[in-house]
Image: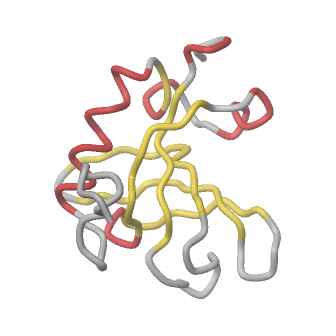
Amino acid sequence: MPAGDDCYAIVANIRKTDGSLRSGAKCWLVGGQNGDGAERFKWRGVSRGGRVITKWAPTKSFQNFRVAWVPDEMRRYFDHDRTMGERARVEPWTVMFNERHPPEHGPDKAHDGVPE
């Protein structure tokens, strides 16, 4: 696994509760693979009951995909190096997911350089 400051991964927010994850919860993509048109990955986030859980879920259930530095204590939950690594390697995934699953409320004007 990547070490030190060179360890980044994808985080996203759940669109709405799916029965187990809290609505809007920040979740880490910790495993799985994208193939055969099926975008199901293993995610780790806060449950409706307040516990941290790991579950499989489709990427369409999430929005606001972004790259975040992975704290040391989180790294043990990742299946392998495919879902984390150098920022430049992880960033293209966030672009792809954001294009396929844009936020329900439309573009975030604060992040698009549009003054409020």
Above or below: residue 116 compared with residue 113: below
Q: Quadrant of residue 90?
A: top left
- Identified at 46% across, 34% down, the residue is 83
Above or below: residue 31 compared with residue 115: above
- Identified at 59% across, 60% down, the residue is 26
Front residue of this view, candidates 104 and 60: 104
Above or below: residue 53 compared with residue 88: below
Q: Position of residue 93 (x, y in %)?
A: 29, 39
- Identified at 28% across, 58% down, the residue is 115
Q: Quadrant of residue 61?
A: bottom left
Q: Position of residue 16 (x, y in %)?
A: 48, 83
Task: Decide if residue 105 is on the left or right side of residue 16.
Answer: left
Q: Position of residue 6 (x, y in %)?
A: 55, 14
Q: Quadrant of the C terminus?
A: bottom left
Q: Position of residue 99 (x, y in %)?
A: 18, 55
- Judging from the image, the colouring scheme is secondary structure
Q: Residue furthest front?
A: 115
Above or below: residue 29 compared with residue 93: below
Q: Quadrant of residue 51?
A: bottom right
- Identified at 44% across, 46% down, the residue is 32
Task: Decide if residue 65 is on the left or right side of residue 74.
Answer: left
